[in-house]
Image: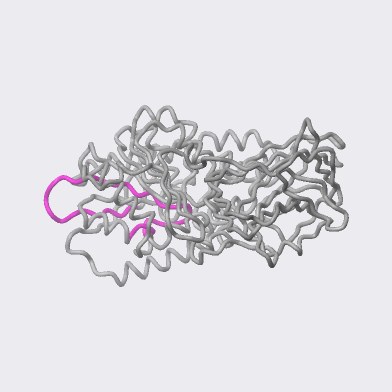
Amino acid sequence: MSWLRAFAVSAVLLLCAITTPASAASSLRIVDIATRDGVTLKSAVFTPDAPGRYPAIIFITSWALPNLEYFVQAQKFADAGYVVVSYTPRGFYASGGTIDTAGPKDIGDLTEVINWTLANTPSEPTRIGAAGVSYGAGLALIGSAFDSRIRSVAAMSCWTDLPFSLFGNQTRHLQSAALLALSAQLTGRPSPELQQALSNFFANEDVASVVAYAQVRSAATYLERINANRPAILMANAYGDSFFGPNQLTDFFNRLSVPKRLELRPGDHAIPELTGILGLPNDAWTSTRRWFDQYLRGINTGIASENPVQLQLRGQGSYESYPSWGTVSTSSARYNLSDVHWWSREGELAAGSQAGWNATIIAGDDTVANGGLALLTNGAEAITGEPPTAWIPAVDRDNAGVWQSDWLSSPQRVRGAARLRLTVTPSNSGQTTVIAYLYDTDWGGTGSLVSHVAVTLRDAVAGQPRTVEVDFPATAYDVPSGHRLSLVIDTVDPLYADKAPFLSTVKFSSSSSSPSYLALPLK
């Protein structure tokens, strides 16, 4: 989460705290919770006023946000009959210690907070939940592997595989990592381990140590422990999450054997949940309330009997539900990449075999096709319903390969993760990067971004062909009849630290033994 978002949310929530009258149904107190190593965690405790025992929810704040973040939602849950403890993790704001980045100290802190809650509030030991957005979501998930008292989790805009978040397809995610690093410096105290990991990441050095650091901080590493503890887990993310892409969640969801639910929506990191944090109607927070009522209070909200996969269609607002991730798509369409014609300087996405061709682009320079700015570009879609766009005729054919389908005679309802198979031959040895963008293009040439993916060859050999097979981030997007699909492949994008060397070349090709194609999962 960027420091700009942290500042904006904190300012708005502070105004809410000042102007919202205290509820007659619950009380708030600010406390310091001491951990085993003497670190103090700044916490807000909301307790129902009526006597009795209550389920408890531990809210863990997002990266670079104080416990004021959940003031509105915590009050709502407390008024409804929950004890709520919201705390700022170590290393941020007035909490002590240094930032552990969801490491062992942070996970131990969550257990300490639960201990304190049971000892100091009228909470029921068998009805403990953990929740959060972003950083808090990851901590809640990992915490459920190490503390079996956590019976339910609501993880919004969460990660499950931190190495994938940092190095998806061997490509460093520059903007997201830079925003996390900057906001940590502005609002907290990074630990020496975090500083070293970030230094290595940005310098592209000792990648193995960064991956090892991140692996310890990933819920997927502890999947067996989570399944053994059997908490009920709700996960919600955005299709365009530039921090924690959705594919890591779908894989994790498939391997969970606990009561579970996966919700995906348009937007970017933490944007789909933002209006709920501010107290406005919000689908993600409504699901969170229903989830905890079902699994902590024992109220039949109906959520347990609903299909566990819920997809909000991009640009439409409506939802589709599925019994499993594997049933999201029922068919597929394969578009083979054709030769690039000299008169149009683009190729076709065709149904028939397209072998025996090659096309070369000049690498190291960006085009109008790009992923934009983390949080902002995809985040706007959550508010406006409009995806990022590019005018396809303006894509420089010297620096990108372009392939387009015929005009569609029927809609293409893309559900899930499209796959690209491509033969790539770089002119340089070492490292090179290609970025593929899939667009829905109208008659005027305006392409709406369906999905994009970057992949880096870290050990390329000059002149040696390499086969790349990579999945685009999952989505739920309807390409209308009368439009066509456009595939653009270039070598530079501002979202990523890795790119092809300037003025090198990259050759794309296809043969009968190594075809290049785009496979779309369809409903």
The x, y position of residue 350, in whole percent, is 72, 46
What is the residue that sits farthest to the bottom in this orientation? 19
Q: Residue at x 53, y 62 (%)?
A: 381
Q: Residue at x 18, y 54 (%)?
A: 48
Give the extent of the magenta segment. Answer: 43-71
In the depicted view, which residue is nearer to us: 30 or 59? 59
Please determine whether, in this image, residue 161 is positioned above or below residue 479. Answer: above
Q: Is residue 251 magenta?
A: no
The x, y position of residue 269, in whole percent, is 51, 54
Query: Looking at the image, how many numbered discs can be counted on the residues?
Result: 0
In the depicted view, which residue is nearer to us: 274 or 483? 483
**Left or right, 195 with reference to 256:** right
In the depicted view, which residue is nearer to us: 185 or 386? 386
**Left or right, 111 with reference to 188:** left
**Left or right, 226 with reference to 436:** left
Please determine whether, in this image, residue 420 is positioned above or below residue 258. Answer: below
What is the residue that sits farthest to the left in this orientation? 51
Please determine whether, in this image, residue 113 is positioned above or below residue 67. Answer: above
Residue 491 shows up from this direction = no
The x, y position of residue 423, in whole percent, is 77, 38
Which of the 4 image quadrants contains residue 22? bottom left
Q: Is residue 45 magenta?
A: yes
Residue 338 shows up from this direction = yes
